[in-house]
């Protein structure tokens, strides 16, 4: 079992510990609980789905990267497929606080990048901030997304964010987590192609600046993330952060980044390049290449 889980594991009930240990012991555990795994955990613990998700929050929070705040937040995005996706907050020393990833963003992006098409619920160990409520409002789950918190009855996103401003107000009706593929032509090496593929599946209905980032770590692993815009603009998640979420949640090491590629349209309304380069540099990676996508 990875050392990151040791403290969290010790807080769990014995029955849940016994059922969970074989999954956490697997070398390829990717921060995802399949429907079959969850059935095993429910039978062993006697907990219903909501209670089990709450009980597993310490495991999600164990993924937190918090060099600035030392305040760990865990979240679980619960997909309509029956799979659950862990997420945790991430901070990056030497970068502006705007580069921070919130736990809800992490879990949701983890689900999105894993092929999940819609969420039923998000379980989190602290009340979602306004930033995260607005981020979740972009999802195709809509205002009916259930938010589950310790010690409180589950409520819908609509109850957390009344009179919300969202995609429909800007005449956008194909929203975050809906399936899309812009089919940008692939070229270059595997890292370039991974960035281009990520851009093809990115979500940028407001700016049209579709983009993706691919990362190579020291062990040769490749990781890619997609841009996700928001009707309110500020809760937008950059493609680099999406890729870093995947590295963190799938057992990679964000301190061993060797090189990166950003794919984005030339001359678009906005560019991810300068912010991506600055954050990568703070993480010790100064090898960033850019490939341009066809306009339109």
Image: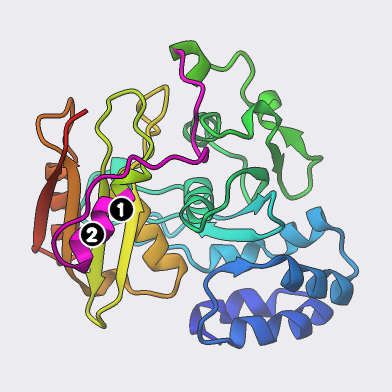
Which residue position is annotated with label 1? Answer: 197
Distance Cα–Cα, label 1 vs label 2 = 6 Å
SS at badge 1: helix
> Can residue 113 be seen by looking at this rendering?
yes
Please give the label number shown on residue 193.
2
Q: Residue at x 71, y 46 (%)?
A: 149
Residue 11, compared with residue 75, is above or below; it is: below
Mark 1, Cα crowd under 10 Å, few <14 / some 14-19 / many 20+, is: many
Give yes or no for residue 187 being in the magenta stretch.
yes
**Circles 1 and 2: CB distance less than 8 Å?**
yes
Quadrant containing the N terminus is bottom right
SS at badge 2: helix
Please give the range of residues in magenta.
171-198
Quadrant containing the C terminus is top left
Residue 126 percent coordinates (x, y): 61, 47
Residue 95, compared with residue 28, is above or below; it is: above
């Amino acid at each position: 079992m990875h050392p990151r889980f040791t403290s969290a594991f010790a807080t769990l009930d014995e029955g849940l510990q016994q059922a969970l240990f074989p999954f956490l012991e697997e070398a390829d555990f990717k921060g995802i609980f399949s429907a079959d795994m969850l059935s095993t955990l429910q039978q062993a613990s006697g907990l219903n789905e909501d209670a089990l998700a709450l009980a597993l929050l310490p495991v999600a929070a164990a993924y937190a990267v918090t060099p600035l705040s030392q305040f760990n937040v865990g979240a679980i995005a619960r997909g309509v497929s029956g799979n659950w996706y862990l997420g945790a907050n991430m901070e990056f020393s030497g970068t502006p606080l705007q580069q921070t990833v919130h736990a809800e963003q992490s879990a949701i992006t983890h689900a999105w990048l894993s092929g999940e098409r819609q969420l039923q619920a998000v379980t989190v160990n602290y009340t979602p901030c306004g930033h995260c409520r607005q981020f979740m409002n972009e999802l195709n789950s809509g205002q009916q997304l259930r938010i589950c918190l310790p010690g409180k009855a589950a409520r819908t996103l609509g109850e957390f964010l009344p009179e919300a401003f969202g995609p429909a107000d800007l005449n956008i009706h194909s929203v975050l987590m809906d399936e899309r593929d812009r089919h940008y032509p692939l070229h270059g090496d595997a890292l370039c192609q991974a960035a281009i593929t990520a851009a093809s599946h990115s979500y940028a209905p407001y700016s049209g600046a579709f983009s993706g980032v691919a990362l190579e770590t020291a062990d040769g692993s490749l990781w890619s993330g997609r841009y996700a815009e928001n009707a309110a603009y500020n809760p937008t998640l950059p493609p680099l952060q999406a890729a870093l979420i995947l590295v963190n949640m799938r057992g990679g090491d964000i301190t061993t980044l060797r090189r990166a590629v950003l794919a984005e349209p030339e001359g678009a309304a906005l560019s991810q390049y300068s912010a991506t380069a600055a954050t990568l540099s703070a993480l010790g990676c100064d090898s960033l290449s850019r490939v341009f996508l066809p306009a339109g």
